[in-house]
Image (cartoon, rainbow, N blue to C red):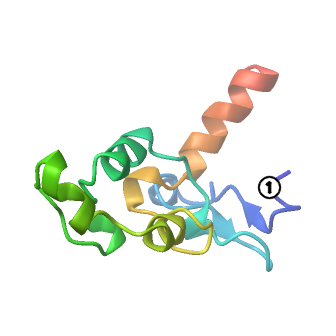
Amino acid sequence: LLEYLGLQIDDENEQNLDLPLKQISHGIDAQCFGIYDFAMSYRYQNHDVLHEYGAASSTSTSSTATSSAPSSASISTACDGKTPLPNHLVLTSRDWIFIKECIVGG
């Protein structure tokens, strides 16, 4: 599966386990391959935009939040699969080793 996506588990060096997957061909960018953060989605819905995605944070109340709410374009850019994810959301080699062990056993 990963090879088809242009990615590979990087287990050659233990220090690489907590880094994004190794990019082996054109496909999904390793920095964009991760999990969707539901907290981020909630914050967008409540107009509290995360700074990791390049937008300013808004602490407005609901009566004024609509004027400073992020546009649908800024939300889709943050979750478009082309914009690099924050490091804590990117799937790492260690994550994939765990997934693999859960599926096929230790």
Q: Secondary structure at mark 1?
A: loop
**Residue farthest along the front direction in this orientation:** 63
69 versus 54 height, above or below: above
39 versus 60 height, above or below: above
Tally of numbered discs: 1
The quadrant in which the C terminus is found is: top right
Name which residue lies at 55% across and 44% down: 94
26 vs 49, left or right, is right
Name which residue lies at 35% across and 52% down: 44
Q: Closest to the observer: 85 or 96? A: 85
- Residue 20, image quadrant: bottom right
Residue that mark 1 sits on = 2
- Residue 98 in the image: x percent, y percent? 61, 33
103 vs 83, left or right, is right
- Residue 95 in the image: x percent, y percent? 57, 41
- Residue 55 in the image: x percent, y percent? 28, 72
- Residue 79 in the image: x percent, y percent? 54, 62
- Residue 8, image quadrant: bottom right
Q: Closest to the observer: 74 or 64? A: 64
Name which residue lies at 79% across and 73% down: 27
Amino acid bearing label 1: Leu
Mark 1, Cα crowd under 10 Å, few <14 / some 14-19 / many 20+, is some
Q: Closest to the observer: 29 or 92? A: 29
12 vs 71, left or right, is right
**Residue farthest along the bottom direction in this orientation:** 26
Name which residue lies at 76% across and 19% down: 105
